Amino acid sequence: MTLDIIVSFYRGDTGPFIREEIRSRVLVRGKKFLVYTKPSFHESLMNALAAFDGLEYDLFPDPSKDFPEALASCRGVIAGAGHQIISEALHLGKPVLAIPATGQYEQRLNAIMLEKSGMGMHADSRNLSKALGRFLDTIDKFGTQDLRSSERFHLKDDSNTILTMVREFVSLSIPMRRAKQKTA
C-alpha cells in the first residue's frame, strides 16, 4: 500500500507545503525586491538589474541575510522557477518573475503555470532586461486579474491537509501490517 500526493500550486491534490519559518512571518509590502540567482543566469540577471538605476533588492543566496524575512517584506521576487520558491512567494502574495533553468521541463512548466495564475511572469536569460522592465512596469497588476480558467491554483499553505492525509494513511496501514504478521 502506497500513498501518492501531488503537492503543487497548480493541478495538485493539495497546495504546497510551506515551511514554518515562512508561514509565521508578518507580511509587509516593502520597496526592495528579493533576487535569488542561480549560476546559470547570474551574469545576465546582474546585467539586467544594473540597467534599472535605483532598483533596490536583496541578493540571495547570502548566509548573512534572513531569507524568510526578506521574502515576507519584499515587493516582489525575481528568481529561478523552482517549485518551492514560487510556492512560498505565492503563499505570501508576492509577484514573481521566474527564470526557468534551460533544459528543465519542470521549471518551464512552473513558469508557465505561474503566468496562468496571474501572480507573475517568466523570462529566459536571453530576454531578461526586457522582461524585467515589463515585470517592474506591471507589478501592481499581478493578483488583480479575474482569471476564468479551468486550472486549479493553490496559492496558500496546505501543510495541515498534507499532514492529515499522511496520518490517515499511516493509521490505515498499521492494522493491515499487524494482520499480515498474525497470518504469517
Image (tube, helix red, strand yellow):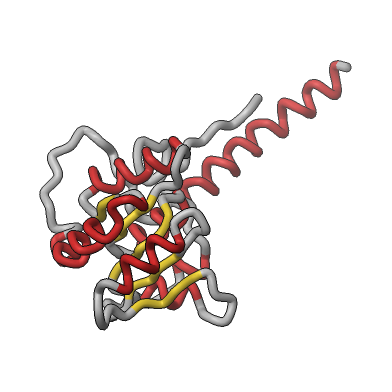
Left or right: residue 101 compared with residue 184: left
Q: How many marks?
A: 0
Q: Measuring 50% from the left and 59% from the top, which residue is drawn there?
A: 38
Does 39 appear above or below 69?
Answer: above
Does 139 appear above or below 131?
Answer: below
Q: Residue furthest right?
A: 184
Does 15 appear above or below 95?
Answer: above
Q: Measuring 21% from the left and 33% from the top, which residue is drawn there?
A: 150
Q: Nearer the viewer, residue 27 or 120?
A: 120
Left or right: residue 14 compared with residue 140: right
Q: Nearer the viewer, residue 13 or 142?
A: 142
- Where's residue 48, x and y in %? 31, 65
- Where's residue 141, x and y in %? 13, 61
Q: Measuring 36% from the left and 52% from the top, which residue is drawn there?
A: 125
State which quarter of the image contains the N terminus.
top right
Q: Which image quadrant for residue 106?
A: top left
State which quarter of the image contains the C terminus.
top right
Q: Measuring 36% from the left and 36% from the top, which residue is drawn there?
A: 11
Q: Which image quadrant for residue 166?
A: top right
